[in-house]
Image: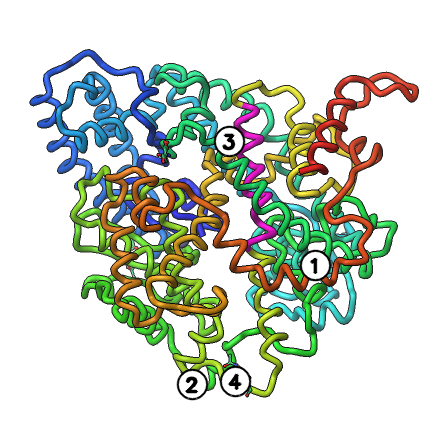
Amino acid sequence: MSVVFDILTVVFFKMDAGRSALALRVLLLAFFTRHVSTEDYFRMGVNTNSAEAMQFLREYDREASGMCYRVTMSQWRFVTNITEYNRRRMLEELTLSSKFERLSWRKAAAYDSSRLPDPQSRRQLTRLVQASRAALPDDKFAEIQQLITEMKEIYNSAKICPYGQKPYDPHVPRVSYNQDFPTNQYQLANQPYQHYQPFNQENPENSNYCDMQLDPEISRILAHSRIESELLYVWKSFRDQTGPKLKNRFMRYVQLANQAAVETGFRDAGDQMRAAYEDPSFRASVEEMYNQVAPLYKQLFTYVRRRLVQRYGETAVRSDGPIPAHLLGNMWAQNWKSITDLVMPFPQSPNVDVTAEMLRQGFTPLRMFQMAEDFYTSLGLKPAPPEFWRGSMLARPPQRSVQCTASAWDFCNRIDYRIKQCTEVTMQDLISTHHEMAHIQYYLQYAEQPQLFRDGANPAFHEAVANAASLSVYNLPHLQRVGLYQNKSHDPYEVSMNFLMTMALEKVAYLPFAFMVDQWRWSVFEDGVQNMNNRWWQMKLRYQGVIPPMPRTENDFDPGSKYHIVSDQEYIKYFLATILEFQIFEQLCSVSGHAGHLHECDIYRSRDAGRLLSEIMQPGSSKPASELIRTMTKGKTNRISPESLVKYFRPLELWLRVQNRDEPLIGWSSNYHDVALFAPQRGAGPALDTPLVLTCLVCVIGYLL
Ligand SMILES: *[C@@H]1O[C@H](CO)[C@@H](O)[C@H](O)[C@H]1NC(C)=O
Ligand SMILES: *[C@@H]1O[C@H](CO)[C@@H](O)[C@H](O)[C@H]1NC(C)=O
Ligand SMILES: *[C@@H]1O[C@H](CO)[C@@H](O)[C@H](O)[C@H]1NC(C)=O
Ligand SMILES: *[C@@H]1O[C@H](CO)[C@@H](O)[C@H](O)[C@H]1NC(C)=O
Ligand SMILES: [Zn+2]
């Protein structure tokens, strides 16, 4: 889902939730971690010759576009044809562009951008300079890059043994993960997952026994297993294989990132990351957003907890307590859609899924892309250029190794745009196709901007726009309009509630997690690396209502089980994007003349919606996000607001309130035992020591929120 395409991830063949837009930001991210910022912060250079500065920017634009083209092409060749030769070529290009960027940074930082008469040039220079770590001396700059690379390698090579720890038995039949996973059989049989690992056809004895990786094996166990001890086992084992090995490197990384930030003129690395949002009260703004969505989250949480109590019993889940983190179908308890089967409002009514109908109508990947293109041209937006159809990889090619995560690419030459997706004929891929095509549309719309502005208005925009478009595709009226869904005799209310529940498990359940990750990271940058794991769980408890299923100590490093932490990728943008997508969606629906429930809005064929989308996309990042939001909302506000999201889920919230009417508590309360799972307990005896009292204060506050 992420706009950020992380190239070093690709180098190691693994992606974390990566749907991506690929542009100059790729090379900048790989080597600098770019964060754009307001002008007030930055310590500027002394060169006041503005003619020279403008000349520099013109040259930079040309050279950076060329460099970006070469790097992007080498990356494309590699991920669509994974060979050692292509990897080497790509690394060479990356090294060259790293040198180029560092050199450009030095030149740019020499200018006093405040003296530039042209505000757009001032903005370009600011973008180029402020987000970089190039202020570090050479050795330290190399060191932090090396640390991030190593942390990703450790993360990506984490492997665990199958549950049960049985020695390898060649007579036990094994399932290859290339085969369809027999979800239902598995759930019915209630058998542990131990036979699930790669099967070496040539030599079964040679199969490495302990080689279950996060993707796909471990994630699938967490999604499909309903055996608590097995869930607990994989939850713990993956953390054992990541955190402790990463902790020391992470602490050094914090030190270096902070040094880079300070030398660039920021208070700390969190401050530098937040600057991209150009909002002086950013922290207060996001906290307020969290508070606005918390009541809805707590209704969902309370209902889901009841169902988990029914499934796993009171000994596993307390009726008014937090939820143990391993029961929600996901390694980080961030997306709950895998436990849909446990929480469906009306199990006798169907879940919206048009896959069977697509197969019946003989859909192909090409037809899915044509359908997505038609969606955007129906709004009056641009068709995909011929180069797109020639160059894209729309399905998994036979006989070569490719990296399959769906992503949308901008080759920085205003000609080449491509999508890479191993499309299969499923509803999920149909939505994903529309999503990636929205990124392509975004690239086409801001193509005329200078290279430094070919990006979303802030880091949340690309994803938000792509998801806003998807919201109009994944709903019953639209699927009906394009002939994929027939109104059968099912109760429309029940179908609606099932639909909204699946959306809520993905979007609403995600918000507190997406919020807390950077709360934690900022606190580490700001307050230091002591008690990192304790603070992580304090925040998990306070914001998500989730506790570890077993005791944790400072020897564990549970934030290290999240890829975006170890790979140095900002996370708050996912929180904002999830909120913003509904805000954009509501505006699109409003100009298209939609009346009625928001979750039934379809903007297909609305030229007015297309015009508004175009107004949002065309400026790229040449204007502050607040200005765009002001335009988009017809002057009503300049802020990202969760009102639309809350409105979208309102019918579900009403239903949840009824379901929860007999619950002892909406939300969660934590007790001494919950907190003792992760808080350090120094000394003996009943007297609470200070950290514990503090922690409990935090839980009380968390509960009150
Ligand atoms: C894949 O890359 C190799 C170079 O390693 C090249 O020889 C080959 O032609 C490429 N295959 C395709 C289908 O592009
Ligand atoms: C299979 O692998 C085992 C263990 O590495 C080895 O001892 C054995 O000789 C191999 N058998 C074949 C047929 O390659
Ligand atoms: C939004 O507008 C208000 C005035 O209406 C202004 O004070 C505030 O700074 C603006 N926020 C941003 C982020 O620009
Ligand atoms: C489906 O049909 C029923 C009755 O035939 C109708 O009440 C309902 O509004 C229809 N639903 C949609 C989404 O068109
Ligand atoms: Zn995306």
Q: Is mark 4 within 8 Å of ligand 4?
A: yes
Could you tell me which secondary element the residue under label 3 belongs to?
helix
Q: Is residue 364 above or below residue 506?
A: below
Say which mark, if any, is on residue 657: 1
Say which mark, if any, is on residue 487: 4
Q: Residues within 10 Å of mark 4 (few under 14, many from 20)?
A: few
Q: What amino acid is found at the position of numbered circle 2 in the picture?
A: Gln
The residue nearer to you, when weighing 501 against 20, is 501
Q: Is residue 26 visible?
A: no
- Comes first in the chain, label 2 or label 3: 3
Q: Residues within 10 Å of mark 2 (few under 14, many from 20)?
A: few
Q: Residues within 10 Å of mark 1 (few under 14, many from 20)?
A: some
Q: Residues within 10 Å of mark 3 (few under 14, many from 20)?
A: few
The residue nearer to you, when weighing 75 against 5, is 5
For disc 2, the marked residue is 361
* Colouring mode (rainbow / by chain / secondary structure / one colour): rainbow
- Comes first in the chain, label 1 or label 4: 4
Q: CA distance from mark 1 to mark 4?
A: 28 Å
- Comes first in the chain, label 2 or label 4: 2
- Comes first in the chain, label 1 or label 2: 2
Contact flag, marks 2 and 3 (Cβ < 8 Å): no
Foreground mark, 4 or 3, reads 3
Ligand 1's quadrant: bottom left
Say which mark, if any, is on residue 284: 3
- Comes first in the chain, label 1 or label 3: 3
Q: What amino acid is found at the position of numbered circle 1 in the picture?
A: Arg
The residue nearer to you, when weighing 206 against 671, is 671
Left or right: 667 with respect to 32? right
Whether residue 64 appears in magenta in the rendering, the answer is no
Q: CA distance from mark 4 to mark 3?
A: 45 Å
Could you tell me which secondary element the residue under label 4 belongs to?
loop
